[in-house]
Each structure stands twice: as structure tokens, then as C-alpha cells.
Amino acid sequence: MPTKTIVLIHGLFLSYKGWDHWVKYLEGKGYKVIAVPFPGRDKSVAELRKAHPDPELGKRTLEEVIQHHIKVIDGLDEKPILIGHSLGGLMTQILLNRGYGAAGVAIDSGPPQGLLSTKWSFIRSAWPLLNFLNPSSRPYLMSFKAFQYAFVNGQPLEEQRKAYDDQVVPESLRIGRGALTSTAHIDYKKPHAPLLFIAGETDHIIPASLNKSNQSKYKDSGSVTDFKGFPGRNHYGLAHKGWEELADYALNWIAKQKI
């Protein structure tokens, strides 16, 4: 029987509720869908902002978040399909590399340890994580201006503001900086479940070229590792107008894997 369970993994700075429209859409296609909040993040955007700066949030690490998702996966009746956005895309790669998941779709994926971009848009967007003058112990709340550039570039102002107000939450810098450590190491030669990279070609924070470089690293794995770029899409492609195009492409690709 084909796998009919999907686990959705959100990324940095955004609420897991940003997956709500995907949950409804994928359930309509016959899947059991679980959107997993990071530890301590199963609250509303308003509640999380009101608690800022929450010292407990500042202690969260990438490995802690990964183990949280592993616990959810271990409690399922079957190996799920993993679909992750941004850091969630990196976590999708890590989980597949560790043997979890029947297949993975990494949307605008954060890069594993040792893989970075020299593009100015990447450096500017990721600067809060890369600038170690920002103490790891203090949670970071992205400004609207930074969100405009890194996530929703090219969208009308009213859409940008709504996305910021509805979805942006304080974040642990320790989680993001975990991508620079061995926690985010990928053994590219290790066989893995089928993996698809989806990239927005106008994405500032994770340029499509970085996703393409990421995909090419797997060339010696002997496993299905595909790439699809979407013109005109930024880093917020999972919620930007026409997001169904991404979901449908992912579902059609999954169907072809016969998992």
C-alpha cells in the first residue's frame, strides 16, 4: 500500500499554522496530514509575540527540534512523507539521512553544514543568524522590513503586511545556527528515500542556485534526488498566491516514486 501519511515541517521565524491551507488541501487528496510545531511553539502568533523575549525559547536547539519530530514520526503507523519548508527542508534532509521518512520534499531548503552561498541576498537575509554579535541566548523577532526582503519580495505591500502579522514569531537563534554545526551534517553518499528539492527562483534568503548546489551534492548516493525551480516565486512560496502549483507538483512527484 502507498504511504498515505504526510508530516509537514515548518521553518524559522514562522508559525506552524502557516501550513493550515496545505493540511486542508492534502487531506482533500486522501492523505493523513500532521503539521508539527517546534517545541513550545503550539501557541498563537499573538501569544508567542507577547512572551518575547522568552528565555526558554532562547535555549532551544536544532537537535532538540529534530528529536521532537522523530518522536512524532516514531508514533505513526507508517513511515511518512516529509514535506519541509526552509529550515524544515533542511530537517527533511537530515531525517531522511538518518533513515526516517518514505520520501521527502524540501521547499526552499536551508543548506546542510558546509554549504553556503556568496550571493548578497543570502548574506543580507541570513545576517541575523550569521552575525554572532547577536547573542544566541536571546530570541530574535524579525522586523517587517527584514521579512519583506527575505521572505515576501515581489508581493504587494498589503500581502506582505498580512503575512507578517499572521505568521511571523520570535525564534531561537540556536536553532538556526545549528545548521552550521555537525547536527546538520549530511552524508551525501548514503542511500536515502526519494528526495525532491523545490526552489523559488526569486527567493532571496535561499537562492535557487543554492538549492541546486544542494541537490547536486547527492549525485553519488544512488538514490532519487530531483530538483524543480518555479519562476516568479519567493521564499514564501508555500503560502503565496498559486501555492497549489507547488503542492500538486510535489504530490505528482510522490506518486511516481511508488512508495
Image (cartoon, rainbow, N blue to C red):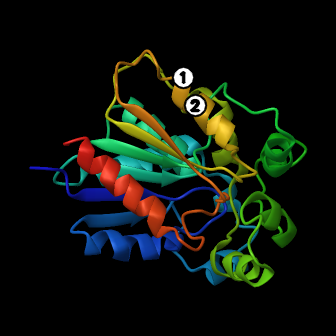
Q: List x then y, in percent, for residue 178.
A: 64, 38
The one nearer the camera, 23 or 55, is: 23
Left/right of residue 10 with respect to residue 176 in the rendered view: left
The residue located at (57%, 80%) in the rendering is 44
Q: Callout 1, which amino acid?
A: Lys
Q: Mark 1 — residue?
A: 217
The one nearer the camera, 82 or 201, is: 201
Q: Is residue 242 above or below residue 161?
A: above
Left/right of residue 104 with respect to residue 78 in the rendered view: right
Q: Mark 2 — residue?
A: 214
Label 1, residues with CA under 10 Å away: few <14, some 14-19, many ≥20: some
User: SS of the residue at dot 2?
Assistant: helix
Q: List x then y, in percent, for residue 94.
A: 46, 36
Q: Is residue 33 above or below residue 227?
A: below
Q: Is residue 85 above or below residue 22?
A: above
The residue located at (77%, 58%) in the rendering is 150
Residue 239 in sight: yes
The residue located at (72%, 75%) in the rendering is 164
The one nearer the camera, 83 or 69, is: 83
Q: Callout 2, which amino acid?
A: Asn
Q: Quadrant of the C terminus?
A: top left
The CA distance from mark 1 to mark 2 is 5 Å
Left/right of residue 198 with respect to residue 204 in the rendered view: left
